[in-house]
Amino acid sequence: MFYRFCRSLFRFFFGVFCGWEVFGAENLPQKGPVLVIANHFSYWDPVVVGSALGRQVHFMAKSNLFSYPVLGFLISKLGAFPVDRQRIDRTSLKRALSLLDEGKIVCIFPEGTRSKTGALLPPLPGAAFLVRKAGVSVCPVALQRKKRIFGNNLFPCYHVHVGATFSVNKPGRRDLQADADLMMAKIKELLEDSI
């Protein structure tokens, strides 16, 4: 209930004040576990992805965000869970796998951090590890920040492109980094197709 309320509020906000557009939202499966992957260049990105998709999304969020009392409380209520980016965080991986096992959606930013320039960064293997362990489909989301000719650019104007789901679970031994590169290439394709 709280998640749906916040999503509706932000959809209204992005629609009225930011001129955002969402393409391909119907590509997200309406039920079952899905790992959503997206590029990352702004603190707004999780809010934008969560608002664009029609189901609740559980985000891995850097652990220090939870140290702020109000923010930590809010993002926990919205389904986020902490990840320590300084090491392999087995607790967060188990949490993500548990959520996927329950048929829910988990979102991860494969780059592992925000891109300061907006250009795609090389992906880390974490998302590929989750897909291999959980055996779930992947839904790529490409985020583009658009500048408005008129108006205040304080609030971000996004174009959100939701791609078709795909699988990387092929038989045989596979290289996690190769799978991570494949997953990032899907985001890159969405960005290139939208130009």
Image (cartoon, helix red, strand yellow):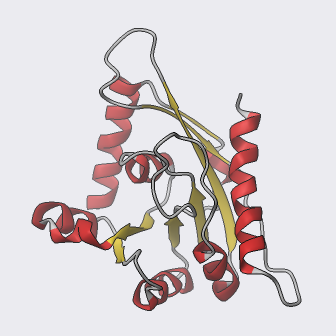
Image coordinates of residue 187 in percent, x first then y, are 68, 51
Specify the farthest residue to the left: 69
Observer-nearest of 146 and 74: 146
Specify the farthest residue to the right: 172
Image coordinates of residue 176 in percent, x first then y, are 72, 79
Q: Is residue 185 above or below residue 156?
A: below
Q: Is residue 127 above or below residue 116?
A: below
Residue under the point 49% across and 48% down: 115
Image coordinates of residue 189 in percent, x first then y, are 76, 45
Observer-nearest of 152 and 20: 152
Observer-nearest of 123 and 165: 123
Residue under the point 50% across and 51% down: 40
Specify whether 75 is left or right of 35.
left
Q: Quadrant of residue 160?
A: top right
Image coordinates of residue 20 in percent, x first then y, are 47, 30
Residue under the point 88% across and 90% down: 172
Observer-nearest of 108 and 10: 108
Specify whether 69 is left or right of 40.
left
Specify whether 117 is left or right of 3.
right
Q: Is residue 31 visible?
A: no
Image quarter of the N terminus: bottom left
Q: Is residue 20 above or below residue 123?
A: above
Image quarter of the C terminus: top right
Q: Is residue 170 visible?
A: yes
Q: Quadrant of residue 184?
A: bottom right
Residue under the point 64% across and 85% down: 134
